[in-house]
Image: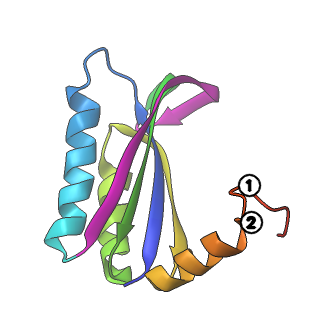
Amino acid sequence: MPIYQMFCIAAHFPDYQHISGLVRQSALHILDAGGVVRNIESRGTRNLPQRMRRHGNYHEIGDYWTMHFDTAPRTLLSLNKIMRRDPRVVRWTILKLGSRPEDIAREGRRTMMGDNTASLDI
């Protein structure tokens, strides 16, 4: 199964039950389809770089979060449908990090030198 990273900007609400429900819904969708959720990380609440419109509402503040997961490509289609319809989502994107975990590990080894400092080889 390919490895993906989803970056999402959710509409900001005073209580965090809305973003918690969105993250839980996304993760359970991946798990129910036989995928693996590797990491969920909150990037905090920030002002958006510009005013964004979604579902008829304008947003100036958003809650940023990321999720790393493994799943079949078909599951991405249904996950995109869920994100598109959900009024809590302002923007999202999904990046394919690699086809296998070995691909990710190999890339990580190339960017690290022996003394644990990042190399400039790109």
Residue beneath disc 2: 113
Question: Which x, y percent locates residue 120?
Answer: 85, 62
Relative to residue 59, is residue 31 drawn left or right?
left
Q: Which residues are magenta?
A: 35-55
Q: Are marks 2 and 1 in contact (CB under 8 Å)?
A: yes
Tell me what residue is drawn at x 57 percent, y 32 percent: 52
Q: Quadrant of residue 6?
A: bottom left
Residue 106: give its label. Answer: none
Residue 40: image x %, image y %?
35, 49
Q: Identify the residue under disc 1.
A: 117
Residue 42 higher or lower than 46, as above or below: below
Instruction: Report the residue at 30% width, 46% height from top.
Output: 86
Quadrant housing residue 38: bottom left
Please identify the dominant SS of the magenta region: strand
Q: Is residue 46 left or right of residue 83?
A: right
Q: Is residue 44 magenta?
A: yes
Q: How many marks?
A: 2
